[in-house]
Image (cartoon, helix red, strand yellow):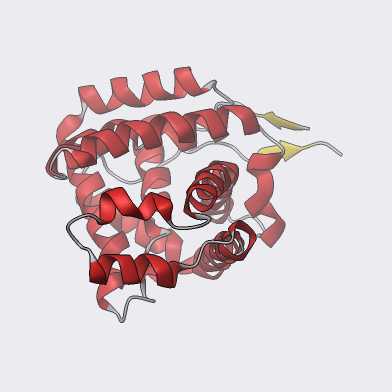
């Protein structure tokens, strides 16, 4: 069972996008092995879905090559594809607590506490249901906004930047986390937008490093969320675990 001490308002990054990104980089340099390990674990679990579902990606590629005009209609007739996408969505939700675990690791490093890979799984012991519900809701919001010519999604993203840290450090419900994140972003939208855009660009830059580089850069975005939280809500005290 986890309990939470009162927050300690410590010196964090200044409330500017540059300072927040720099703070996140400093922390990420100390935890990147843990973050990459967590991401690789998530990828491994995701890869296991395909053989379980019976879906063969080669069939989808053939459909794209042979009938690109009708692929959106015909793809659903490929054996196992419905099961594959259904399981992928479910597994994505069940893996969301690992995102919170990376944020927890970032906080422990910021407090000079000893790190352990098992810290990655704190979201399965603390506030699990609200983390999953928030992940579902935020995913729907982002999917709809990015589907509208992509650009609107970039302007919606800042409103969701603090949800995961609030769920972890304040043990909030998914609705309270969304509401507080929205309100803070609304009041400080310029900084939140700049931070979100910079963090997003940095996190996807690994795509240009032979694609596989995304494994090394994608977790940075979660640390940016943590640094943004510290800037506007103060650095949390350590989370005390009771046996």
Q: Name which quarter of the figure residue 140 lies in.
A: top left
Work out whether residue 52 or residue 124 is closer to the camera in this orientation and state it: 52
Q: Is residue 13 above or below residue 160?
A: below
Q: Residue furthest right?
A: 243
The quadrant the N terminus occupies is top right
State left or right for residue 169 relative to residue 220. right
Q: Is residue 17 above or below residue 182?
A: below
Q: Which residue: 47% across, 33% down?
A: 136
Total label count? 0
Q: Which residue: 30% across, 37% down?
A: 142
Q: Name which quarter of the figure residue 144 lies in.
A: top left
Q: Residue furthest bottom?
A: 210
Res 127 visible: no
Residue 188 spot, x, y in % from top left: 21, 28
Residue 175 spot, x, y in % from top left: 46, 18
Residue 116 spot, x, y in % from top left: 69, 60
Q: Is residue 201 above or below residue 153?
A: below
Q: Name which quarter of the figure residue 213 lies in.
A: bottom left
Work out whether residue 208 or residue 59 is closer to the camera in this orientation and state it: 59
The quadrant the C terminus occupies is top right
Q: Which residue: 22% across, 64% down?
A: 67
Work out whether residue 13 or residue 67 is closer to the camera in this orientation and state it: 67
Res 219 visible: yes
Q: Is residue 213 above or below residue 234?
A: below
Residue 201 spot, x, y in % from top left: 23, 59
Q: Which residue: 64% across, 60% down?
A: 52
């Amino acid at each position: 069972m986890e309990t939470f001490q009162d927050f300690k308002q410590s010196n964090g990054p200044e409330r500017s996008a540059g300072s927040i990104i720099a703070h996140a980089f400093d922390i990420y340099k100390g935890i990147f092995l843990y973050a990459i390990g967590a991401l690789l674990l998530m990828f491994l679990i995701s890869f296991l879905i395909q053989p379980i579902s019976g879906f063969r990606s080669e069939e989808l590629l053939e459909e794209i090559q042979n009938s690109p005009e009708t692929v959106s209609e015909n793809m659903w007739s490929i054996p196992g594809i419905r099961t594959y996408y259904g399981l992928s969505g479910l597994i994505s939700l069940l893996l969301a607590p690992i995102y919170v675990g990376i944020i927890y690791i970032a906080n422990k490093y910021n407090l000079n506490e000893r790190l352990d890979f098992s810290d990655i799984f704190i979201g399965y012991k603390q506030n699990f249901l609200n983390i999953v519900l928030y992940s579902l809701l935020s995913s729907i919001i982002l999917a709809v906004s990015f589907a509208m010519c992509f650009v609107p999604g970039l302007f919606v993203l800042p409103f969701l930047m603090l949800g995961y840290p609030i769920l972890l450090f304040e043990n909030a419900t998914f609705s309270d986390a969304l509401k507080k994140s929205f309100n803070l972003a609304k009041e400080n939208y310029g900084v939140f937008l700049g931070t979100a855009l910079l963090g997003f660009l940095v996190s996807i830059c690994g795509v240009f490093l032979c694609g596989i580089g995304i494994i090394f850069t994608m977790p940075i975005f979660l640390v940016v969320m943590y640094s943004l939280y510290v800037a506007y809500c103060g650095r949390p005290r350590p989370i005390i675990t009771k046996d």
